[in-house]
Amino acid sequence: MALVAVVVVAGCYLAHRALAIARRPLLVSPFQSGWPPTEHALSRYHVRWYLVTVLFLAFDVEMLFMYPWAVVVADLGVTAVVEMFVFLAGVLVAVVWAWREGALRWV
């Protein structure tokens, strides 16, 4: 069984090497821009970008909740409006906290 596995893997490898089309360097560069990369693809980002990402996701989730709410607010009445203002108050508290912690400061 092991011999069959080795033969199949070797056959697949040889078939790939024989039939593969040589890729042009321009097509395999990042974003097909033609510019050579200046740093490694797995380089680390500054921690402020993670904070910006979390803030973006918070506002993105806010919009995710507000679109369906806008469809049903007329049917649900005042309770829907109160619930949305409670939700927005929670988001506002999170933004004020992030602001006080310096997450929005770039210097």
Image: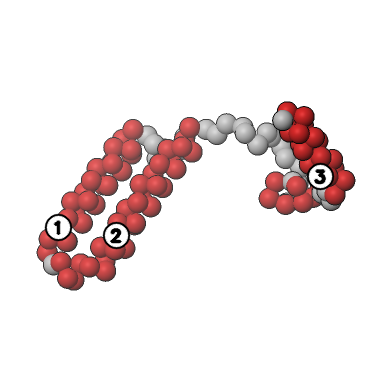
Quarter of the figure with residue 72: bottom left
Q: Residue at x 17, y 61 (%)?
A: 80
Q: Are there few (<14), some (14-19), or many (20+) residues within 10 Å of tag 2?
A: some
Q: What residue type is labelled 2?
A: Met
Q: Residue at x 68, y 33 (%)?
A: 40
Residue at the extreme front of the image, as rendered: 1
Q: Are there few (<14), some (14-19), or many (20+) residues within 10 Å of tag 1?
A: few
First reached walking from the N terminus: tag 3 or tag 1:
3
Q: Are marks 1 and 2 in contact (CB under 8 Å)?
A: no
First reached walking from the N terminus: tag 2 or tag 3:
3
Secondary-structure class at tag 3: helix
Q: Mark 2 points at which residue?
A: 66
Q: Where is residue 85 in the image (x, y as percent from the top left)?
A: 19, 55
Residue at the extreme left of the image, as rendered: 78
Secondary-structure class at tag 2: helix
Q: Which residue is drawn at 48% across and 32% down?
A: 47
Residue at the extreme top of the image, as rendered: 2
Q: What colouring style does the render use?
A: secondary structure
Q: Residue at x 27, y 47 (%)?
A: 91
Q: Mark 3 points at which residue?
A: 16
Asked whether 46 or 61 is in front, the reply is 61
Q: Which amino acid does label 3 sit on?
A: His
Q: Position of residue 12 (x, y in %)?
A: 78, 41
Secondary-structure class at tag 1: helix
First reached walking from the N terminus: tag 1 or tag 2:
2
Residue 58: in sight, yes or no?
yes
Q: Mark 1 points at which residue?
A: 82
In the rendered view, does 30 fall on the left or right side of 15? Answer: left
Q: What residue type is labelled 1?
A: Val
What mark, if any, has residue 3 been given in the picture? none
Of marks 3 and 1, the one in the foreground: 3
